[in-house]
Image (tube, helix red, strand yellow):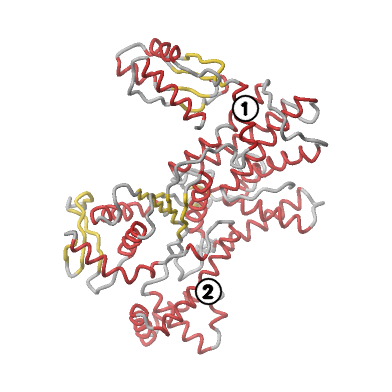
């Protein structure tokens, strides 16, 4: 049980003993050191419900509150806040236990089978900056949930089906005859653009492309082989990005739209049998009473078009059906642009009504905002074009390399490149993951690569600072007891003890920035501890204890940054 859970439980019991059995405890970490380590804020609401004085109720709660061995001081502040100061001895024992544990004291959870669907590029083109947020937010969530002990299934629901693939296959055949298919496929953006030009300019080519769509959907083996070649080349482009970004998506996590193609007619029939399908102007539609048009009529969701074609809504419904029937998932998290919120709400509703997703299966759209340029508009090239993600990441490394070369010219070329990779890629990822996912944010190289403030380089440097302490220490007793006497020691230990609570909050709300904020707090508190409590100049038990706190700080920073997919270095 985490400290927060433990205190919540005890405060809830004290509220019940004081005559407020249904009042929420509402305990949270205190915002300022003078308020203690935790603060209980549930008394005012309970007092209002009981029509009693908040401070009088708070006094009853404190009298009934059993925090023996956990807190050394509990006090009432303001109209009825309860400030809880943890006992240094308690924090010391928690710190020692965390330091000895590979998972830093994280208790095993009741594991759920959780799918995180993220990245999901369209294989017709190379990945661009618009895929960045889904990819890194989804990867961070998958890592955190795995770390907590859940059974995580990663899913890359790529767009690998549809009419555009007939056009691409036709162009692949044409360029193969010309002998330059491999050359053109090395640049998917150019390949797609040239195919589109041919489609628009040549009626013969367009007709050939349409024929290929029919053959592809009909399972023609020769056309399928060409399509598979195109998909393979596209995925190799994606895998190069994933490797550079240090995210966990592999080829085995790919299950594209094509995987559900054979099930789509079956889904239509099952929706019809459930009484959900209506024919409307030749199309087959599900009308949802809970979604209204501007004319206050039920909104229709097209399942099959009048020409017999299916939409991606139908494919998404098929994916939910498969994930329940075959994968037996408890929770499915879709990390997709916030602008798709209505699509997911409607799709989830249809799946519930049709029985494709039972009530206990959690379906969750984790939306996010837009990455903006300095002009406050969606991030583009100077000419207004789409920025390829691989090119952005390459530029991040080069900018970090120039910065590292200037700050530490004595490093070898190999060391400079290693630092540039960790710092450059880490900076891009952290600039995103340190913001609430629902917020738009401005992409700025100077800000994200700064070694001061809430940035990846600052946190990475904080980790290397810890490592430098141990390089300078001639000896270190990894079993030494921790003794907390100074305020800076206690503040650092109290924050380190909140690691598990932070991860659980990330997993529950799917907000990675909770972890980023926490790690920045740890780095800041370690800096204060480092200045206020000399480590290597201390002696005996004090020195050994402070080295232990430094070791726990390093392990926590490393684990936390790894959960964000950000590398650390022993020296920078």
Q: Secondary structure at mark 1?
A: helix
Q: Residue furthest bottom?
A: 177
- Nearer-N-terminus badge (1/2): 1
- Disc 2 crowd, CA 10 A, few/some/many (<14, 14-19, 20+): some
**CB within 8 Å, label 1 to label 2:** no
Q: Residue 85, image x and y in percent?
A: 55, 19
Position of 35 compared to 451: left or right?
Answer: left
Q: Residue 276, image x and y in percent?
A: 19, 59
Quadrant assignment, res 198: bottom left
- CA gap between label 1 and label 2 equals 54 Å
From what the image shows, is residue 1 above or below residue 383?
A: above
- Disc 1 crowd, CA 10 A, few/some/many (<14, 14-19, 20+): some
452 or 134: which is nearer to us? 134
The residue identified by callout 1 is 93
From what the image shows, is residue 251 above or below residue 442?
A: below
Identify which residue is drawn at 39% across, 50% down: 331
Identify which residue is drawn at 42% across, 70% down: 160
The residue identified by callout 2 is 233
Q: Secondary structure at mark 2?
A: helix
Q: Residue 229, image x and y in percent?
A: 49, 78
């Amino acid at each position: 049980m985490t400290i927060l859970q433990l205190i919540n439980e005890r405060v809830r019991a004290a509220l019940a003993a004081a005559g407020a059995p249904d009042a929420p405890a509402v305990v949270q970490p205190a915002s300022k050191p003078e308020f203690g380590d935790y603060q209980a804020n549930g008394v005012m609401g309970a007092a209002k419900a009981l029509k009693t004085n908040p401070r009088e109720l708070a006094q009853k709660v404190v009298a009934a509150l059993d925090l023996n061995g956990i807190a050394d001081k509990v006090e009432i502040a303001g109209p009825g806040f309860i400030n809880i100061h943890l006992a240094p001895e308690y924090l010391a024992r928690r710190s020692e236990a965390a330091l000895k544990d590979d998972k830093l004291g994280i208790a095993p959870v009741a594991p759920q089978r959780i799918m995180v669907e993220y990245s999901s590029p369209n294989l017709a083109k190379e990945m661009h900056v618009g895929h960045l947020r889904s990819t890194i937010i989804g990867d961070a969530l998958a890592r955190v949930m795995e770390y907590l002990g859940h059974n995580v299934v990663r899913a890359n629901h790529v767009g690998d089906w549809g009419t555009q693939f007939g056009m691409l296959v036709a162009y692949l055949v044409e360029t193969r005859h010309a002998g330059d298919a491999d050359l053109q496929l090395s640049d998917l953006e150019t390949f797609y653009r040239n195919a589109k030009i041919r489609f628009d300019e040549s009626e013969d080519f367009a007709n050939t492309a349409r024929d290929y769509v029919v053959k592809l959907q009909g399972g023609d083996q020769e056309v399928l082989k060409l399509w598979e070649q195109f998909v393979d080349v596209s995925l190799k482009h994606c895998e190069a990005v994933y490797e550079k970004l240090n995210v966990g998506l592999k080829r085995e996590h790919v299950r594209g739209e094509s995987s559900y193609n054979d099930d789509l007619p079956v889904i239509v029939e099952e929706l019809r049998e459930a009484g959900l399908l209506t024919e409307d102007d030749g199309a087959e539609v599900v009308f949802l009473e809970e979604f209204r048009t501007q004319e206050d009529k039920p909104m229709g969701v097209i399942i099959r078009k009048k020409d017999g074609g299916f939409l991606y809504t139908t494919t998404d419904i098929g994916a939910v059906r498969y994930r329940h029937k075959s994968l037996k998932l408890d929770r499915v998290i879709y990390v997709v642009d916030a602008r798709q919120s209505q699509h997911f709400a409607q799709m989830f509703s249809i799946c519930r009504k049709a029985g494709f997703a039972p009530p206990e299966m959690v379906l969750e759209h984790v939306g996010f905002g837009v990455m903006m340029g300095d002009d406050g508009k969606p991030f583009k090239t100077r000419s207004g074009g789409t920025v390829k993600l691989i090119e952005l990441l390459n530029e991040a490394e080069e900018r970090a390399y120039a910065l590292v070369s200037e700050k530490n010219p004595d490093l070898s070329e190999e060391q400079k490149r290693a630092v540039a990779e960790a710092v450059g890629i880490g900076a891009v990822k952290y600039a995103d993951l340190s913001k609430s996912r629902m917020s738009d944010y401005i992409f700025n190289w100077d800000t994200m690569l700064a070694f001061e403030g809430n940035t990846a380089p600052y946190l990475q440097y904080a980790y290397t600072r810890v490592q430098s302490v141990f390089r300078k220490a001639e000896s270190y007793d990894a079993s030494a007891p921790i003794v907390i006497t100074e305020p800076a020691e206690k503040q650092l230990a109290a924050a380190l003890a909140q690691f598990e609570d932070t991860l659980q909050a990330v997993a529950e709300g799917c907000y990675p920035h909770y972890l980023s904020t926490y790690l920045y707090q740890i780095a800041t508190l370690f800096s204060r501890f480092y200045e206020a409590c000399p480590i290597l100049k201390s002696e005996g038990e004090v020195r050994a204890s402070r080295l232990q706190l430094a070791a726990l700080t390093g392990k926590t920073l490393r684990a936390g940054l790894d959960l964000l997919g950000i590398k650390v270095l022993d020296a920078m």
